[in-house]
Image (tube, grey):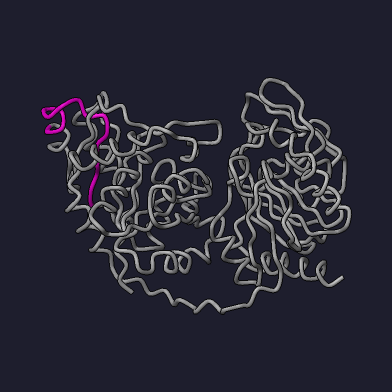
Amino acid sequence: MQRPRIVIGGERSGVGKSTITVGILLALKERGLDPQPFKTGPDFLDPMHHSALLDRISRNLDTWMFPRAVPELFAHASEGAGISVIEGVMGLYDGFDGRSEEGSTAHLSKVLKAPVVLVLDASSSARSVGAVSLGFKEYDRDVDLPAVIFNNVAGQRHLEMLQDSLRGIECLGGIPSQARARLESRHLGLVPLGEETEWERYEHIRWLVEDNVDMGRLIEIARSAPPLDVPIDDVPKTSSRVRIGVARDGAFNFYYEDNFQYLRRAGAELVFFSPLHDDVPEVDGLYIGGGYPEMHASTLEGNAPLRRKIATLSEDGMPIYAEGGGLMYLCRRLHDQEGRAHDMVGIFDAEVEMTSRLQALGYLEAEAVRDTILLPRGSTLRGHAFHYSRIIDPPKDGYAYRLGRGKGIRDSLDGMVSNNTLASYAHLHFGYCPEWAENLVAACMRYRRR
């Protein structure tokens, strides 16, 4: 299976790989190559940018959170694309911990047999970047690292010095340091593109890449990737057996696209609605993902009929699954950044407050300590958490997960449960265990047949 593909890695976070990746994607789109974007790791916002700019939905690939699913998910999503571009995460070799390659951009490049272009920050450096790039290339010789792109280049003379320093690695170009084109950030990463009104910024980023990066050579490198031996199973055409309402708007938009596909494959019809403005659709279950409910707290509070309806459905036993911001929404009250209190759904008798300090960031591992709509007791899970909020008065017991790694709601416990409602800070990708999607659909079917 021939799939042209390239990984855009970085020496570390903050070197500009997200901005340069966006420019590369737009330049490839301009050439009619219909690029398929991917993001290494669990981040939600980079894929949201990719998807909004292109005609394809970006997907996450994570060799720690769902290692067995990565090759097939890549193969399915890249089908029909002229080229696939995989944006890295943090530094090229940064992953699960300091000893393991799992979760790193480098590991993903090896799994997918994809060549890597490394983004290096050239500010305040010259010949030393040759040593840095050589170190990255030699650190793991199984990583195919043929080229670099320099960022923050002071001028033509500086670029020539950088190029002359390289040993066994080619330079595809250098982005000028005076080019103030970066993507805006917020406390959970990049600002969602839907909130960005300066579309000219993205056109400027494309031109920066067009003018300063050898796109022809980049495409050649991508096309040099060897064939992938990944058996693609035909997705069975399962008729929809249940309807699941998915909260999706400015307040709730952190979802792994593949989770939707797993649910559809299990027999769910997904009905998208907005907790900001809509009523609950006629469904058999609800899925409320993460996002920024604190930034829309007044509007969420104002939609009291919806809040009351969700609380009533939970009391009636409807399966409701929530993550991150969805957990916050299902609590009794939310205190925003200014300390203002807003009434929320109230399924859980707890209050949430936004803090200025990061409360949790990174991977988590857990064991299910009770049966829920998603997974049975004794099951293991891997997930990710990233939030600035905290539960002020969390319940003492009744949790679904006991964490062996990571921080939950309290005392290494996560996943509050009420009737058939499950809400956690943990974000899960169903690729780790597709049965989770099947279990949720089965719970919705039981509710429907009552």
Measured along the vertical axis of the image, is residue 287 above or below residue 326?
below
Spot occupied by residue 290 in the image (x, y as percentages of width and height):
63, 44
154 drawn magenta:
yes
**Of residues 393 and 166, which is closer to you in this image?**
393
| Residue 420 spot, x, y in % from top left | 83, 57
Can the viewer see residue 210 in this picture? yes
Q: Tell me: 48 left or right of 392.
A: left
Whether residue 404 is visible to the viewer of this picture, yes or no, is no
Labels in figure, total? 0
Rendered position, 418 above or below 242:
above
Left or right relative to 291: residue 86:
left
Looking at the image, the residue that sits furthest to the top is 338
- Which region shows up in magenta? 146-160
Q: 173 left or right of 68?
A: left
Residue 194 lies in the magenta stretch: no
Residue 446, above or below 257: below
Q: Is residue 383 left or right of residue 229?
A: right
Percent position (x, y) of residue 26? Answer: 30, 47
The residue shown at (63%, 31%) is 295
